[in-house]
Amino acid sequence: MDAGDRFVTYAIAGLGSRCVAALLDFVLSLLLMLPPFILIILPLGLPMWVAIISGMLMMLGVQVALCWACEVMFDGQSPGKNICGLRVVSLHGHAAGFGQIAVRNLMRLMDFLPAMYLAGLVSAFVTAHNRTLGDLAAGTVVIHDPGLAAQLESARVPSSVYSTSEDGYLLESFLLREEQLKDPYRTLLAQHLARHLAERYPTAASAVPGALLTSAPSEFLRRLHKAAQGGAE
């Protein structure tokens, strides 16, 4: 990923961490699927094998919808990926687009074949960057998300001269380096940092127009910094 005068690199997620994340998503999907399965499918009195297949299809549908929605809303992270520190991005390291996430999750139906994601596991095992069939079709890859502090450190931001807290360092180092970063890395990093600080410091964030959080995250950060220094307009 181009980060101005140097490249920021990410570690490709290994099969072990991806399997753990997938297992967590599977368990959550199973919990979400059980109530409608018990209340709708079982009362139909279907043969056991039909009920089991119906339950598997329902669970898979729930997992596709869950991961699709979460990866769109949370920058490529399903619940399991969030817990394991993983993220879906494009092959170029940029945020995965809506279409890429849609294709990737719809391809879960193929990755699942013949059972328990065997096709996806085989694909991840034999391809470069551990890519499943969904990743191959969507042009995506799963990475270890190093977090804000590691990203700023890898971009060689200057040390903070004002703050002693980690969050203060993150804010000031981003503002000092902002003009040297290139989009979409700059915008994506600003979005992550703005959401993080707004959640951690709601009182300080209330001094900044909330609309800036999504429409202009860099401006939100600049005003938040002024507010913290007692210079908010």
Image (cartoon, grey):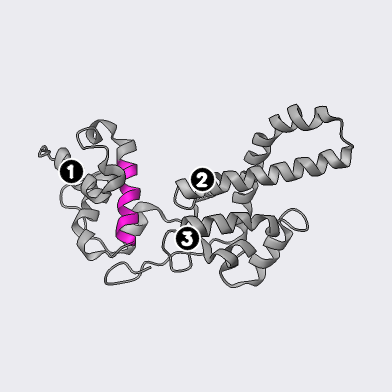
Q: Secondary structure at mark 3?
A: strand
Residue at 74% across / 53% down in the picture?
Answer: 116
Residue 165 in the magenta stretch? The answer is: no
Q: Is residue 46 left or right of residue 183?
A: right
**Amino acid bearing label 1:** Arg
Question: Can you identify the residue that label 3 sits on?
Answer: 89
Name the quarter where the N terminus is drawn: bottom left
**Amino acid bearing label 3:** Val
- Find the distance from the CA under tag 1 to the CA under tag 2: 29 Å
> Could you classify mark 2 by the number of other residues whose Cα lies within 10 Å: few (under 14), some (14-19), or many (20 or more)?
some
Question: Can you identify the residue that label 2 sits on?
Answer: 70
Name the quarter where the C terminus is drawn: top left
Question: Can you identify the residue that label 1 sits on?
Answer: 223
* Residues at marks 1 and 2 touching, judged by CB atoms closer than 8 Å: no
Label 2 vs 3, first from the N-terminus? 2
Magenta span of residues = 184-197
Q: Secondary structure at mark 1?
A: helix
Most common SS among magenta residues: helix
Residue at 29% across / 43% down in the picture?
Answer: 213
Residue at 46% across / 59% down in the picture?
Answer: 96
Question: How far across and how far down the image is residue 156, in percent?
Answer: 27, 64
- Find the distance from the CA under tag 2 to the CA under tag 3: 14 Å
Question: How far across and how far down the image is residue 132, in percent?
Answer: 62, 63
Label 1 vs 3, first from the N-terminus? 3
Q: Is residue 175 above or below residue 199?
A: below
